[in-house]
Image: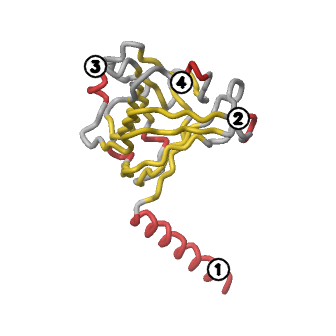
Amino acid sequence: RYQQVFASSEFSGVGTITEIRFRPDAVSGFPFSASLSNVRIGLSTSAATPDGLSATFANNVGGDETVVFNGDLTLTSADLAGPGGSRAFDIVISLTTPFTFDPGLGNLLFDFQRDASSLSPLGVSFDAQYLAGDSISRAFGSRASLTANFGVDTAGLTTLFTVVPEPHEYGVLAAIGLVGFALWRRCAAK
């Protein structure tokens, strides 16, 4: 089991998450395809903070938890170049159930569970960072355990979320655009 919390400050507003993307590590990444059995992914709004996750998994999960994926999952990567020497975010998990996240209500918790051993025998390494005081951290352990029996630390996978803004967000942006256009026309007319 792997939980990762993301600070709400990393999100610009209310939106619906439809996809989660990762990228291979820039040094040890390579093209791969891996099938994972019995995967369960939950997203929730959490009171847990980066560098403040509980070792008890249940304490990190918010009351609005939504199972966004449940079943067998195939992950692939072409290990393509990304900006600044990184790799492209081409490890994609399309959510079968989208999750609406409001950063004003707390942080985002990603809760990944699966059967069997880790991907490490395949040599797959995702891009991650280990930096105290940043906007992410993790708790990880055996799926059968109620606690993070492998550890809680400040590391986290570099993650990209596909977020569709809520309709009222579009309305606000359109209103701002119309006001800006009206001001421009008014100044141009003078």
Disc 2 to disc 3, C-alpha distance: 35 Å
Q: Which circle's residue, 4 or 1, is located before the other in the chain?
A: 4
What label sits on residue 50 in the rendered view? Answer: none
- Residue beneath label 2, please? 86
Drawn side of residue 9 relative to residue 24, left or right: left
The residue at the point 39 percent across, 25 percent down is 1
Amino acid type of the residue tagged 3 in the rendering: Leu
User: x, y (%) of residue 33?
Assistant: 60, 35
- Residue beneath label 3, please? 146
Q: Which circle's residue, 2 or 4, is located before the other in the chain?
A: 2
Q: Which element is circle 2 on?
A: loop
User: Few, some or many C-alpha atoms within 10 Å of disc 1 (few <14, some 14-19, many ≥20)?
Assistant: few
Amino acid type of the residue tagged 2 in the rendering: Ser
Amino acid type of the residue tagged 1 in the rendering: Cys
User: x, y (%) of residue 54?
Assistant: 33, 21
Which is closer to the viewer, label 2 or label 3? 3
Residues at marks 3 and 1 touching, judged by CB atoms closer than 8 Å: no
Examine the rendered structure and indicate whether residue 121 appears above or below residue 190: above
Residue 37 or 58: which is nearer the viewer?
Answer: 37
Amino acid type of the residue tagged 4 in the rendering: Leu
User: x, y (%) of residue 123?
Assistant: 62, 22
The residue at the point 63 percent across, 77 percent down is 184
> Where's the C terminus, which quadrant?
bottom right
Drawn side of residue 25 relative to residue 164, left or right: right
Examine the rendered structure and indicate whether residue 177 appears above or below residue 70: below
Drawn side of residue 167 relative to residue 66, left or right: right
- Residue beneath label 1, please? 187
Which is closer to the viewer, label 3 or label 1? 3
